[in-house]
Image (tube, helix red, strand yellow):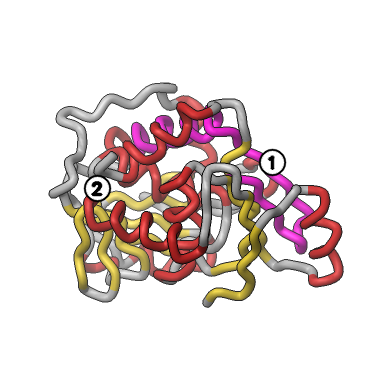
Amino acid sequence: MRTPPELFRAAARLDPARPFLTFYDDVTGERVELSYTTTDNWVAKTANLVIEDLGADPGERVALFLPTHWQSVVIYLACWTAGVVAAPGADPAHCAHAVADPEHVEELAACPGGRLLVPLRPMGARALELPVGVLDYAAEVPAQPDRFHAAPPPTAEDPALERDGAVFTAGQVVAAARQAAADLGLHAGSRLLVETDLATAAGLSTALLAPLAVGASVVLCRNLDPAALARRIEAERVTDRLLSTR
């Protein structure tokens, strides 16, 4: 287990049907639950989209401008599965491709390569407006193949994450994930509730990497309503929580 995709596959083997990610948005009223099997399917489809439709090659940098959302988690995993470098907040003018939500359409326009808009609308609805030359994630991903085969698969030595100009290999990402899990005291039976900005280093570690390292599950909250917290902790059988990591 030397790369993030290998971590995911190892965690999935424990029980593919169990929840991996439960997402809440208390503004839109959304609740989306993904098992390991369903997440794997979304990741495969998205990795195919990144390579075939966006046109990314392994090792290329993909600028990401995405909020805390279940589709953002899928896109990070898909980038690592496809062997491309996830570069949250990077200068899109100097990246091969860019993926963004509707609030960052200007960043998409600055990218010289493939550009992908993630509408983030409830029920997977398509974008209300789509700039010329930009792909709509919601429209394109359903038709992608359900399996992804990287040739060759990413290795621990391959670059996987760029943040603030520093590049981290897949092996370094895995090592950081394991350390974060140890720091948080997570294990395979943990169910972690987090309200965190995925674009930050702490957010990515707590909401995705640390739970993935030990096969834990995540309750990811956006626009968390404090009045709903106690009820949610009980309903989702939360064992650990980490709020407002920004």
Is disc 1 placed on a helix, strand or loop?
helix
Q: Residue at x 30, y 52 (%)?
A: 174
Mark 2 or 1 closer to N-term? Answer: 2
Q: Position of residue 183 (x, y in %)?
A: 45, 66
Horizontal relation, residue 60 to residue 216: left or right: left
Q: Nearer the viewer, residue 32 or 217?
A: 217
Q: Position of residue 91 (x, y in %)?
A: 28, 71
Q: Tell me how many marks there are.
A: 2
Magenta-tinted stretch:
21-49
Q: Residue at x 25, y 43 (%)?
A: 2
Q: Position of residue 246 (x, y in %)?
A: 52, 77
Q: Amino acid at mark 1?
A: Met
Q: Residues within 10 Å of mark 1 (few under 14, many from 20)?
A: few
Residue 200, label in figure: none
Is disc 2 placed on a helix, strand or loop?
loop
Q: Amino acid at mark 2?
A: Val
Is there any visible trace of residue 62 in the rendered image? no
Q: Quadrant of residue 226?
A: bottom right
Q: Position of residue 1 (x, y in %)?
A: 29, 39
Q: Nearer the viewer, residue 108 or 129?
A: 108
Horizontal relation, residue 167 to residue 209: left or right: left
Residue 84, label in figure: 2
Horizontal relation, residue 243 to residue 200: left or right: right
Residue pointed to by mark 1: 123
Q: Residues within 10 Å of mark 2 (few under 14, many from 20)?
A: many
